[in-house]
Image: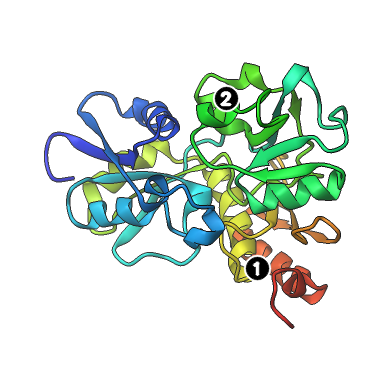
Amino acid sequence: MTGAVLRVGTRASALARAQTAQTIAPLGAGVEIVPVVTHGDRSAAPLARLGGTGVFVSALRDALLGGLIDVAVHSFKDLPTEPAAGVALAAVPPREDPRDALVARDGLTLAELPAGARVGTGSPRRAAQLLAARADLAVVAVRGNVDTRLGKVGGELDAVLLALAGLTRLGRADAVTDLLDPLSFLPAPAQGALAIECRSDDAATRVALARLDHPDTRAAACAERAVLAGLRAGCTAPVGALATVLAAPADRRLVLNGSVTRPDGGFAVTGSATGPITDAEAIGRRLAADLLARGADTILGRLP
């Protein structure tokens, strides 16, 4: 924290600015939001072609380490699983609903879409899970902001599949025509959660940000991301994971479900693991090892 004003960096998209403003509001006055254009924002290429991991993150971290900003706010699912030198995960705020949401013409649900309906998504995971549920659908790769994607519905697309969290933060949840069961359509690891970073040597900012941290969300998101790390997969891999913290005071346990789905939807490896909330990352690594032992490497394009 270099001065009286805390400079908070975020991607320049409407969604990123909205979720950042909502998240840092408890910090009160003396905060300046600084939009940063990332490589992923500049390119219209599919995320898998861009390399996926880190395309929305590296510019923000460079600005942070270069002293241009004091804080970086990310969608947690976009972060590489490897730690970054000089950067601390200062807070993980309460999570928004992690489910995927369908927005379809004429108010249709996923089950009601006709055979051959064109469904847009930019996520290989969502594409694989859609085809696993409805092999008769035509999945179309799309990029662009939320409004751009929604604008395609009823024209070139019959529906789009998006994160409910983003729609909610933009005030567009009323567009949803179907919420997908999170155990059948496991979301991306840490979907709906945000990660707030600062420089690891900036003790004052770490203290200021600590009030934004939600320990249960941090544990759940870290368990899910440990699955991704254990699979040696990036954020564009067809990997789903969702952790639930059991609320019983005498038994603070975490239940974690994970899946790896073949891109054509023809096969999936699924599993679950549980344990004390204090062992969140170990639970994630254990589930990843189980998925690998049952064929996840083959789905991810690697021979065991």
**The one of 231 and 153 positioned closer to us in this rendering:** 153
Image position, residue 5 (x, y; %): 16, 34
Q: How many marks?
A: 2
Check disc 1 and report its element: helix, strand or loop: helix
Please give the label number shown on residue 285.
1
Q: Position of residue 70 (x, y in %)?
A: 23, 46
User: Which quadrant is home to the N terminus?
Assistant: top left
Q: Amino acid at mark 1?
A: Arg
- Crowding at label 1, few (<14), some or many (≥20) Cα neighbours within 10 Å? many
Q: What amino acid is at disc 2?
A: Gly
Residue at image point 73% right, 74% down: 297
Question: Which residue does the image show at 68% across and 23% down from the upper left?
Answer: 154
Q: Is residue 244 above or below residue 51?
A: above
Closer to the camera, 211 or 263? Answer: 263
- In this rendering, would 147 be left or right of 9? right
- Cα distance in 3D space between marks 1 and 2: 40 Å
Query: Which of label 1 and label 2 is nearer to you?
Result: 2
- 224 with respect to 20 (left or right): right
Task: Inspect this view and state whether residue 156 appears.
Answer: yes
Q: Which mark is residue 103?
A: none
Residue sitting at the far left? 3
- Element on which disc 2 rests: helix
Q: Residues within 10 Å of mark 2 (few under 14, many from 20)?
A: few
Q: Which residue is mark 2?
A: 151
Report whether residue 198 is seen. no
Mark closest to the chain's N terminus, 1 or 2: 2
